[in-house]
Image: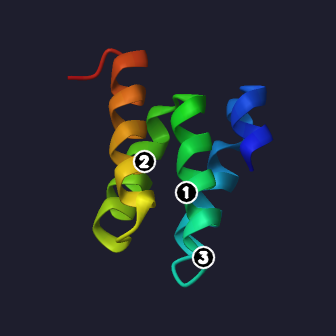
Amino acid sequence: VFALGELGDRNVVPLLIEALESLYWSDCTTRFWLVQALGKLGDARAISALQDAIKKHHCETAREAEASIKRIEELNNIQ
């Protein structure tokens, strides 16, 4: 998951969103890396899923989701 964010290929964004949404009961580490990869890719399509992650998860994932949303908003000039 980490490598997908590093590669910068936004074609994987829908797959990462789907994985994040389907892994509610999975471990925090996996969700964290999914959220971080979405933030690194900077695609605004991920904002809704990241907002959901903030509401659903009570570990580092929520904080990383907030940082990822901020990163995406800055990259896309969203205010």
Kindly identify which numbered label has been placed on residue 61.
none
Tell me, yes or no, whether the two marked residues, 1 and 2, touch with CB atoms within 8 Å: yes
Instruction: State the mark number for residue 64.
Output: 2
Q: Is residue 54 visible?
A: yes
Q: Quadrant of residue 22?
A: bottom right
Q: CA distance from mark 1 to mark 3?
A: 9 Å
Q: Residue at x 47, y 41 (%)?
A: 45
Residue type at mark 1 is: Phe
x then y, percent, for residue 76: 40, 18
Q: Is residue 77 above or below residue 72?
A: above
Q: Nearer the viewer, residue 79 or 67?
A: 67
Of the numbered discs 1 and 2, the one sitting upstream in the chain is 1
Label 1: state its secondary structure.
helix
The local crowd at label 2, few if under 14, some if 14 to 19, many if 20 or more residues have their Cα within 10 Å, is many
Pick out the residue farthest to the bottom.
Answer: 25
Secondary structure found at label 2: helix
Residue plotted at (71% across, 26% down)? 8
- How far is mark 1 from mark 2, CA to CA? 7 Å
Identify the amino acid type marked 2: Glu
Would residue 9 be seen by someone viewing this image from the given angle?
A: no
Q: Residue at x 61, y 64 (%)?
A: 29
Q: Earlier in the sequence, mark 2 or mark 3?
A: 3
Q: Which residue is mark 3?
A: 27
Q: Determine whether, in the image, residue 15 is placed left or right of residue 48.
A: right
